[in-house]
Amino acid sequence: MSTTDERIAKHGARSLFWRITAATAVVAALATLVAQSGNVAMALGMLTGGGVAILAIAIAGRRYRRRGDVSTGTRVLAGPVDERDRLLVSRSWAITGLVVVGGLVVALLADGMGADVKEAPTVLLWIGLATLVASFLVLDRKS
Amino acid sequence: MKNDVRTLREAAGLSQAALGVALEVSRQTINAIETEKYDPSLPLALRIARYFHTQIEEIFHVND
């Protein structure tokens, strides 16, 4: 392994460790808060979903360390990223932001017209996540 | 933007992955530059030019 490879690998391992530690702390704290408010089922759901996401990051990190040459998505999850990866991520977030803001406007208009928009935050969250993943995949193929 | 990165890389006998390691970017970034899907930042363009001991304008050409 060259010096550059070793430096990137070390940086990647450190970055991955902190990402996983931070993600675990955030998920545990939020699940605890939700459980204390009495919604145990939602807390368990958060722990399950958060656990799956953290596991995906850990697997991506392992693939990165073992293979080196991995997909853009794996690199974004496990790091370190280069300038093209950062551009793809920021463009994906920009598209996601536009879609979610558009959805919020629609929800507010619907609320103003008397519709039941109680589920709108959940729906918008899923739409946002789907948009983020889809836009990232499309941009990765096209640029 | 048109560029001669592929020509220079192949003349140097390098793979995309090897050039990526030398320039501290991914193989995919090198591929995207070579296929003109991605225009590198000015710092990366400078690193590419320095790596091949030439000038930016000798490698990158504006599409007319």
Image: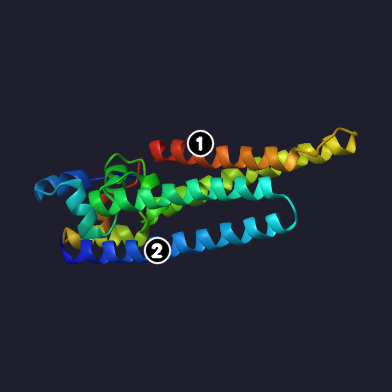
Question: Mark 1 to mark 2: distance in Å?
Answer: 27 Å
Question: What residue do we see at 32% from left, 43% from top?
Answer: B32
Of helix, strand and loop, which one carries label 2?
helix
Residue beneath disc 2 = A17
How far from the left and from the top, in percent, is residue B25? Answer: 29, 55
Name the subunit of mark 2: A
Q: In this rendered view, identify the residue nearer to me: A44 or B19.
A: A44
How far from the left and from the top, in percent, is residue B54? Answer: 18, 59
How far from the left and from the top, in percent, is residue A141? Answer: 39, 36
Q: In this rendered view, identify the residue nearer to me: A19 or B37.
A: A19
Quadrant position of the C terminus of chain A in the picture: top left
Q: With B63 as the anchor, is A22 left or right in this view?
A: right
Q: In this rendered view, identify the residue nearer to me: A84 or B34.
A: A84
Give the number of the mark in front: 1 or 2. Answer: 2
Residue type at the position of mark 2? Phe
Q: With A11 as the anchor, is B5 left or right in this view?
A: left
The numbered mark at residue A11 is: none
Residue beneath disc 1 = A134
